[in-house]
Image (tube, rainbow, N blue to C red):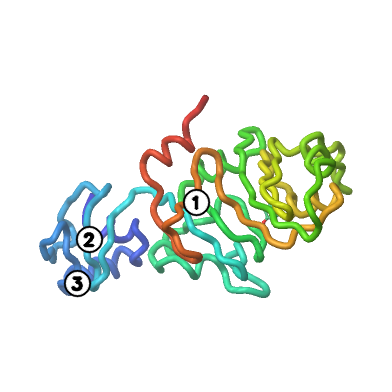
Amino acid sequence: MTLDRILQSQGFGTRRYCGDLVYAGLVEVDGEACDDPRARFEPEGLRLVVDGEAWICHVKAYLMLNKPAGYECSQRPLHHPSVYTLLPVPLRERGVQAVGRLDQDTTGLLLLSDDGQFIHAQTSPKRKVPKVYEVTTAEPVTLAQIEALRNGVQLDDEPAPLAAADCMGTGEHSMRLTLVQGKYHQVKRMVVAAGNHVTALHRSAVGPVSLDPGLAPGGWRWLHAEEVAQLTRKD
Ligand code: URA
């Protein structure tokens, strides 16, 4: 692929603008200056420096973000900043989107991608991707509440009770809840239906991928190839 198209695909601007960046001597490829926008390279893994910013090319973007509290998972947020402001501009420009949504006050693992098929597969109800939540509660967690969450609780707008795929107490005021659906405010509403109240909610895993403990709140990283393979494995 030509260098101007590679830069465009990575979110650095229009093809014309990217060509101008190259002509202006502002682009290095694998450690060497390159001023020919039509020079051809294999994009995956290509190491660029664009106007002083180091960049590794990924044909498709698959990311994890440690979502902090106080951010909305919307491109057009209403009351809080958008999680997309936590990403570098090229990733926003190339159309990276959250895989599902977390509430503004929920923290933890948020996957993002610009691969529409991947997003669709991960959010499809048919796929039943398990999501693990660490829940802090207002009242002490009881065995009866855990049983109710495991067996199914009735939510107002649902035709049938919803059950957690797994639920265990992790402390006097905390539990770990695994859900395979992604209904609106599902954890909070299920915990209320079981007779308690969520005071803090943190997602620690989605399917086989756990939040990287090295990621500070607000930090992001590319998913490793193995993590993408695990998420997309059909079994
Ligand atoms: N369930 C909730 O109630 N909120 C979230 O952010 C995610 C799951």
Amino acid type at mark 1: Leu
Q: Is residue 191 left or right of residue 211?
A: right
Q: Which residue is mark 3?
A: 26
Q: Earlier in the sequence, mark 1 or mark 2?
A: 2
Image point 71% across, 45% down: which residue?
169
Q: Nearer the viewer, residue 104 or 135?
A: 135
Q: For numbered disc 2, what is the local secondary structure?
A: strand
Q: Which residue is mark 1?
A: 211
Q: For numbered disc 3, what is the local secondary structure?
A: loop
Image point 69% across, 53% down: which residue?
135
Q: Which residue is mark 2?
A: 48
Mark 1 CB near ligand 1 (8 Å cut): no
Image point 44% across, 59% down: which residue?
215
Q: Depth-wise, is mark 3 or mark 2 nearer the camera?
A: 2
Residue 188 position within the rendered picture, expressed as x and y whole percent measured from the top left: 76, 54
Q: Nearer the viewer, residue 9 or 84?
A: 84
